[in-house]
Amino acid sequence: MRLSTVLFLFALLACTLRADITVEAIPNPAGPGASGGSLAVSPDGRVWLTWIEPVPGGHVLRFATRGPEQQSWSEARTIAQGPDWFVRTADGGRTWSTPERLTRESESVEFVSLATLPDGRVLAAWLDGRGKHRPGDAQRLYARILGDSALDTLVDPSVCDCCQTTLTTFPDGSALVAYRGRTADEIRDIRVARFDGVKWEAPRPLGVDGWKISACPVNGPQLANIGGQTGVVWFTAADADPRVLASFSTDAGGSFVAPLRLDEVKPAGRVATTLLRNGSLLATWVDAEGAIRLRRVNPDFAAGEPVVLSAAGNARARGFPRLVVARDYTGGKTKAELLLVFTAETAPALRTLRVEIPEGELLEEEKSCECAPPAEDLRGFAVRGLTQGPGALTGTVKLQLNALPGVMRAGSVEMAVEPALVALAAQPDREFIGQIERSRGGWRLIAFKPVARPAPKGSGR
């Protein structure tokens, strides 16, 4: 371990943050001059850290992983080297495909977002400069399914030139993209557009900040979701008042609540966000002094006290910090674990932090009672519907389900059911509430409670 890493670790641990939220540095295998750190979580719970390092004659793209029970990162491995890449892996990173172009229709592509749909297809969205040489033409937002023979899809014909896009997908096969738009009179507010699994819907404003600026702020939004629950965080400086805002949707981005302001000192933006299973939103941003701050917004959409995660410095040197949930909240008094990556002015250039959130204790403190949810309440997704009888296969039932935005469309489905619930759920024509979760690529009914129907009028009951 480098001496600078050790000194940074001790300095960080010596800081008093909050008694209930802790943070520690986790040394990573990135080399000197590393930048562009990003984080992602695979279905098996592994966290993937990627970054770019300078090498003689160019740059190299590398990665490391950290399993759910591991306390350190794996050794660094190389994905690709050279000036232009787009590569994929199908075997956990052991091998990677030959680099290929994202699109063959444009030579001007930047700020690409990628997300995997439930059926395994990869959806991409990006800013595109095709046609900008024509007077009055603007940067555009395009999207496509990778490997599909169809043409690129134009999502929005006028967007901010150099703000990041963010893309998230839902269990029902739909997706949501958020980005900074641009009007003819230079209003650059955040917009969202939905992908229904086949086609894109028309973009719409996320809010009406009214930020008029004749230059690109290089400050894009960030999305996160759990099922249909969707959180979004963004930066605006409308009315000469820089601020970080958060909003929340319970219907996969169909509608959002009025935004909540998160910053308490002047921010520089560069936001990141993630969600816990119980609905708490965690957001980070860089303040004007270059410190990274974190704030938790509970399931009632009330913000807790902000926490400083890093010392002040050059705000631009922080890059764009990224945040993921490494271990989710599982009910009761359990804790959640977050991982954060950012860049620094001094070695090691790429820093990774582990942040522990005592979610159960915070929930009980906020409610003034011992009422943190049990683990079983956080499994899967709540549904409501009508039973239709036994399924064609042993251990399955037919159900008519109400729509659960982002998770399941309304309609008749056949799904596996917990053995103890088969006899109850197979009885036809019973209204019920229950919970479903993913199981071997399909869905399984894991909780079932019949709902009593109101007695008919005039029945005397």
Image: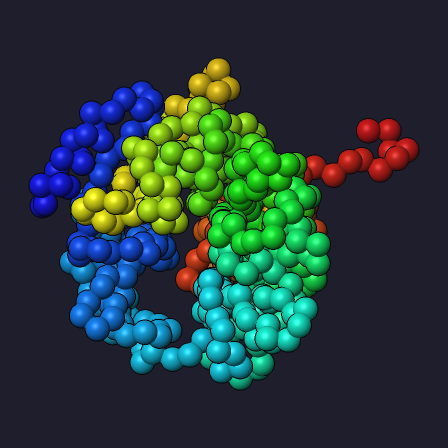
Q: Quadrant of the N terminus?
A: top left
Residue in the image at 29% along x and 47% along y: 343
Between residue 174 and residue 172, name the one nearer to us: 174
| 110 over 171 or under it: above or below | below
Q: In this view, does 55 lie to the left or right of 224?
A: left
> Residue, x 46% and y 40% (percent of image)?
268
Residue placed at 53% from the left, 81% from the top? 105
Residue 137, position as x, y percentages in the image: 65, 70
Q: Which residue is found at the position 55% from the left and 61% from the top?
A: 161
The image quadrant where one finds the C terminus is top right
Query: Percent x, y for residue 66?
Result: 24, 52
Residue 389 point in image, percent of width and height: 63, 57
Question: Which quadrant of the view contains residue 159?
Answer: bottom right
Query: How many numbered marks have been drawn onto this rendered protein structure?
Result: 0
**What is the basis of the colouring in this image?**
rainbow
- Please indicate, yes or no, whether residue 338 appears anywhere in the rendered image: no
Name the residue nearer the viewer: 354 or 326: 354
In this view, the residue in front, 93 or 429, is 93
Residue 381 drawn above or below residue 373: below
Q: Is residue 414 above or below residue 319?
A: below
Q: Is residue 163 visible?
A: yes
Question: Seen in the image, is 368 located left or right of residue 188?
Answer: left
Q: Which residue lies furthest to the top in this view?
A: 368
Is 64 on the left-hand or right-hand side of 112? Answer: left
Give the left or right position of residue 139, taking residue 33 as reference: right
x, y (%) of residue 125? 52, 66
